[in-house]
Each structure stands twice: as C-alpha cells, then as structure tokens.
Amino acid sequence: RMLLAISILPFVHARSRSGAARMCVSGDRAVPITNLKPSAALSPREVITSVMESLHRSNWDRPTECYGFEVAMRFLAPTHAAKLKKAKPTGFSRYLRQQHRIRFVKWNEYRFEGDVARLTGDDGVEEAFQMISLRSS
C-alpha cells in the first residue's frame, strides 16, 4: 500500500528545469484522463497526472456531472477526510472549489519539481511525495 502526497508551488517560468515533465493546456481544450482508476502498477507521477487531468475544468462535468471529481476521488488515500466522511463527488467538488483550493482545479499548466521521495513507515506503509508547480488561470 502506498500513500501519495503532493506539494504545490506557484509556477515560475524563470526556474524552468531541463527534463522536468510538464503538462500545458491552452484555452478550453479538453484534457484526456490517462488512468480512470488506481492500480498498483502506476508510478506516483502517473497517479498525480491522472488526478490532475481529472481535476482539470474540462473534466468537471463531462461526460456526467462531477465526473472529474469522481475519478479523482478514486485515487484518494483511505485516510483522506473525503474518504472517511464518505463524501460524494458533488461535495468533493465544492471542497476543491473553495477560494483557498481553487488553484488545484483551475490549472492551465503544471510540472514536476525534483524527484519523487519515497519513505516507508514503521507500519510498512510506503509513502511517496512529489512537488509540483502549477499555474492557474
């Protein structure tokens, strides 16, 4: 079992690093969701990519209402508050659209910063941490 934490930084063009994986969307172009459900075969970056794609505004309500939020919730750790409270996609949508969280779902561009950090706790649970920079619209 692996838990994943994502740290978000403001996106700064001047800090561009060669080889940094990057996703950029212009205009209202639809963003396809690479993975629709979690799998042990996915790398931490593949999980992040799928969550970020699902949270992109082009996937909020396509093909059904709150679809992108529903997909993102599939990737949440069992200890996440939304999982513990058995939140519905509409509630998760409201949660992420709060003023201090809206940047997570209104992104135009993001990139990975540095390498994935992996830690194993005393309980044997592996955690992965990845910093990303993002630019919101």
Image: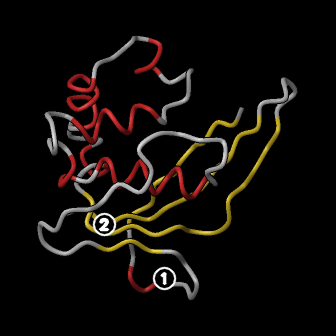
Task: Say above or below: 50 vs 20.
Answer: above
The crowd level at tag 1 (other Cα within 10 Å; few <14, some 14-19, many 20+) is few
Q: Residue furthest right?
A: 122
Residue at the spot 48% in from the left edge and 82% down from the top edge: 15
Percent coordinates x, y for residue 47 in the rendering:
53, 50
Q: Is residue 112 left or right of residue 26?
A: right
Q: Quadrant of the C terminus?
A: bottom left
Task: Say above or below: 22 vs 42.
Answer: below
Q: Amino acid at mark 1?
A: Arg
Q: Quadrant of residue 86?
A: top left
Q: Quadrant of the N terminus?
A: top right
Q: Amino acid at mark 2?
A: Arg
Percent coordinates x, y for residue 74 in the rendering:
44, 32
Q: Which mark is residue 49?
A: none
Residue at the spot 76% in from the left edge and 50% down from the top edge: 118
Task: Say above or below: 110 vs 78.
Answer: below
Which residue has dot 1 on it? 15
> Of discs 1 and 2, which sits in the foreground?
2
Gap between marks 1 and 2 measured at Cα: 13 Å
Percent coordinates x, y for residue 103 in the rendering:
27, 52
Q: Is residue 133 left or right of residue 101?
A: right
Residue at the spot 20% in from the left edge and 25% down from the top edge: 90
Residue at the spot 57% in from the left edge and 43% down from the top edge: 5
- Mark earlier in primary sequence (1, 2): 1
Q: Is residue 72 left or right of residue 84?
A: left
Percent coordinates x, y for residue 77 in the rendering:
55, 29
Q: Residue furthest top?
A: 85
Which residue has dot 2 on it? 135
